[in-house]
Amino acid sequence: MKRQKGFSLIELMIAVAIVAIIAAIAVPSYNSQIQKTRRADAKTALTTAASMQERFYMRNNSYSANMDDLGGSGGTLQSPEGYYTLTSVITGCPNSQPNGSCYTLTAAPVSGGPQDNDSHCASFSLSDTGARTATNTDCW
């Protein structure tokens, strides 16, 4: 009798089950790492916007809440990769400086974008003093 070469259905199903288990472990881990990598886009955007705020201050003796003054368009400023939208809030400083002399920049995920479901580090902020805050302390 001639022996058939190849895989039996059982062997094939075992191989498929092993691949499925590995994929079930690897894919969520991969997606988590991608989200962490995209967070760098927010940090880059905030530091760049802070630099633009300082340049604006040198020219105008005040900070700007209008993101068009900082390189944005239509009143908004997007991060370089487009995962985050930046906003600027101008406030008076607690050390009796005149109003408009302190700012806080905030980066929030674009609504409906790939970072929108990143609940661990949902937003990042950077102030004129260099204070960095985020949703969780380990985000920066």
Image (cartoon, grey):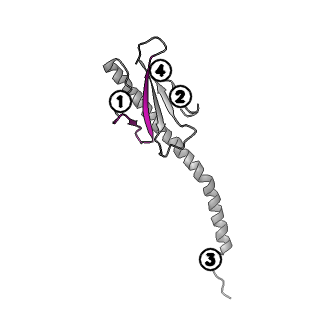
Marks 1/4: CA–CA distance = 18 Å
In which quadrant of the rendered view does residue 7 lie?
Answer: bottom right
Q: Which amino acid does label 3 sit on?
A: Gly
Q: How crowded is mark 1: few (under 14 residues within 10 Å), some or many (20 or more)?
A: many
Q: Are marks 1 and 2 in contact (CB under 8 Å)?
A: no
Q: Nearer the viewer, mark 1 or mark 3?
A: 1
The residue located at (67%, 67%) in the rendering is 14
Q: Are marks 3 and 4 in contact (CB under 8 Å)?
A: no
User: Is 19 displayed left or right of 85 in the figure?
Assistant: right
The residue located at (36%, 19%) in the rendering is 62
What residue does disc 4 label? 129
First in residue order: circle 1 vs circle 2: 1
- Which mark is drawn over residue 6? 3
The picture places residue 89, in percent across and down from the top left corner, at 44, 26
The residue located at (54%, 44%) in the rendering is 117
First in residue order: circle 1 vs circle 4: 1
- Which mark is drawn over residue 133? 2
